[in-house]
Amino acid sequence: MKSPKSLLILLILIFTVSVKVLAQKIVTVDITKVTHTVNRTINMSSSPQKPILHINSKYDAGFAVIKHRNFKNGEITFEVKGEDIFQKSFVGFAFHIQNDSTYEAIYFRPFNFRSDNELRKKHAVQYISLPGNDWPKLREASPLKYEQPIGEDVNPADWFKVRIKVEAKIISVYVNENPKPCLEVVPLSNLNSGKIAFWTGSESAGDFRNLKITEN
């Protein structure tokens, strides 16, 4: 039989966990509320039930900032569709945005998902931290540390679901309902709060929908 002291400690632990779970509220973000764009133009679908944000192609990277309070740590989920066109589809999400050139991002290269080239296949999902750590520097200094394959079961020309788990010491990326992360990295910046945005790379368009945020 447990002592009164042990029972009290157990009750405190249960209460603490319950409060933490309740505090983690999933928020569906209205993606029609774009505060501004950086080096991009956008179009919205006409369906209010499931709006789709389309980012148009342009040289150099760009993004569309979504109206939401500053994001710190938690989970970001959304659906995205790119194109299976070599070097013309880079689609993802930027967070902890400070300004047009200072942020972190996770993005995908759909044209590499099912590539016949094994090395290209390993360059399917990428983490970057700008301005100091863009993909060329990371690939040269730490090959395959900040980019990984995601599996051939993901259709490069169709919608797929992304879940980005952002913690202080690790960022984990999941695709569709796979419980195993396709990428895990230690953040390369000291950024811990900032705006959020749908992101596309140079000469890349992209479609985005169903954005949900769970903050710790």
Image (cartoon, helix red, strand yellow):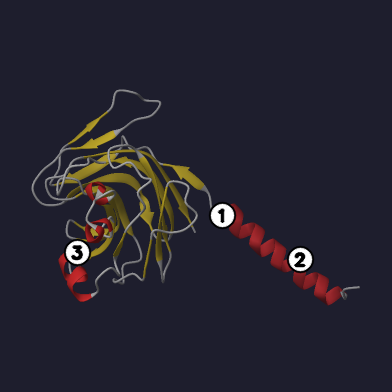
Residue at the spot of label 2: 11
Q: Are marks 2 and 1 in contact (CB under 8 Å)?
A: no
Disc nearer the start of the sequence (1/3): 1
Label annotation for residue 135: 3
Badge 2 crowding class, 10 Å Cα cut-off, few under 14, some 14 to 19, many 20 or more, is few
Task: Give percent across and percent down for residue 8.
Answer: 79, 71
| Residue found at the far front of this picture | 116
Q: Label 3's element?
A: helix
Task: Give percent across and percent down for residue 62.
Answer: 17, 49
Q: Residue at x 28, y 68 (%)?
A: 144
Say whether residue 161 is left or right of residue 158. right
Q: Residue at x 20, y 76 (%)?
A: 141
Q: Nearer the viewer, residue 166 or 14?
A: 166
Q: Nearer the viewer, mark 1 or mark 3?
A: 3
Q: Quadrant of the N terminus?
A: bottom right
The picture quadrant where one finds residue 191 is bottom left
Q: What type is the residue that disc 2 sits on?
A: Leu
Residue at the spot of label 1: 23
Q: What type is the residue that disc 3 sits on?
A: Trp
Q: What type is the residue that disc 1 sits on?
A: Ala
The picture quadrant where one finds residue 190 is bottom left
From this view, report whether residue 177 is shown above or below residue 141.
above
Disc nearer the start of the sequence (2/1): 2
Q: Nearer the viewer, residue 81 or 41?
A: 81
Say whether residue 16 is left or right of residue 159. right
Q: Label 2's element?
A: helix
Per the model, the C-alpha gap separating discs 2 and 1 is 18 Å
Q: Nearer the viewer, residue 109 or 197?
A: 109
